[in-house]
Amino acid sequence: PHLSGHPVALADERGLRVFEVTSEAARRGVRPGMPLREAISLCPSLAVLEQRPARVTRAAEQLVDSVAAVSPLVEPVEAGLVLANLIGLDGLYPDPSDLERALLNAAPPALGARLGIAHQRFTAIVAAHAALPLDVVRVAPDDSAAFLADRPAALLPLPAAALWQLRLFGIDTIGQYAELPRHAAAAQFGAPGDLAWLAARALDPTPVRPRPFEGERVIERSRSEPPLVSRETMALHARQLLQRALRHPRASRRFARQLRLRAVTEDDRLWERTQTLREPTGDRD
């Protein structure tokens, strides 16, 4: 929290390049993908943070759950970016401002969630980037192309290498990319370039792909002080958690279909394994 309002960059896993930046850092020329040395030379006051995967995962899951509390059709795109299909919610929220308030209020306050609402997937994502923390940007269908025109080309749904090429070509805005001939965009960047061209013109055909509805879950957690350090103690700890989960009332007379084991290290590194269990073949399989 003490870094709020300051230029901040998140380093990549190797600690050599910029992975993500705050808007304050972006205004000083710091961009994802550039070497940290170059970023610091551009912005000497830049605060550089190392990645904490476990913390990011927890926050991302909280955000997904908060959106799912309002709309059941939710697609987690990446950590921190969640899409939701809002069609059909007008019965619950007759006033659009009520729906906006419900989504923002459901999100964890510390995340400073930003909400974008539009009729196309890409336009909604760009609208969320344009919103202030705890605020909303709603884009009408007729205004979508004009809204996108002066937004950064770095938001286009293209691989990092393609975005770097756009910078070399002097294409800095989505509108400039939309002005290219469609065949030229497709020839240079393939199918992703063609899809990005459609998105830049507010014609994104990609729908929200909701995650499958989850069955009941049984979750067991524990924290070890001091941290576990040997393979044997970790295996014993995992067995104890599994036994507790199987004794849970919701697991009674049920077959488990998936087992997920997650461990968080002392410095917030994440280890995770998921095992899908085979269908039972007998009374006590």
Image (cartoon, helix red, strand yellow):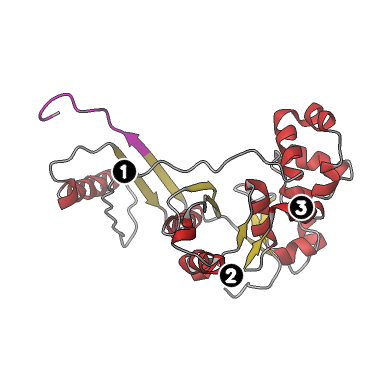
Viewer-side label of 3, 2: 3
Q: Residues within 10 Å of mark 1 (few under 14, many from 20)?
A: few
First to last magenta residue range: 274-284
* Quadrant of image for the C terminus: top left
Q: Position of residue 184 (x, y in %)?
A: 84, 30
Residue under the image location 51 percent in, 41 percent down: 209
Which residue is tagged 2? 134
Which numbered disc, 2 or 1, marks the residue closer to the eye?
Answer: 2
Residue at the extreme right of the image, as rendered: 170
Query: Which residue is under mark 1?
Result: 231
Q: Amino acid at mark 2?
A: Leu
Question: From the viewer's perspective, is residue 117 above or below residue 170?
Answer: below
Residue 155 in the image, given as x and y percentages of width and height: 72, 49
Q: Position of 269 compared to 220: left or right?
A: right
The three-letter code of the residue at mark 1 reads Arg
Which residue is under mark 3? Answer: 148
Q: CA distance from mark 3 to mark 2?
A: 21 Å
The disc, 2 or 1, on the residue closer to the chain's N-terminal end is 2
Q: Is residue 194 above or below residue 99?
A: above
Mark 3 closeness class: few <14, some 14–19, many ≥20 residues within 10 Å: many
CB contact under 8 Å: marks 2 and 1: no
Residue at image x 41%, y 59%?
69
Percent position of residue 255, x then y:
20, 37
Asked whether, in this view, residue 183 is left or right of residue 120, the answer is right
In this orientation, does residue 22 appear? yes
Q: Nearer the viewer, mark 1 or mark 3?
A: 3
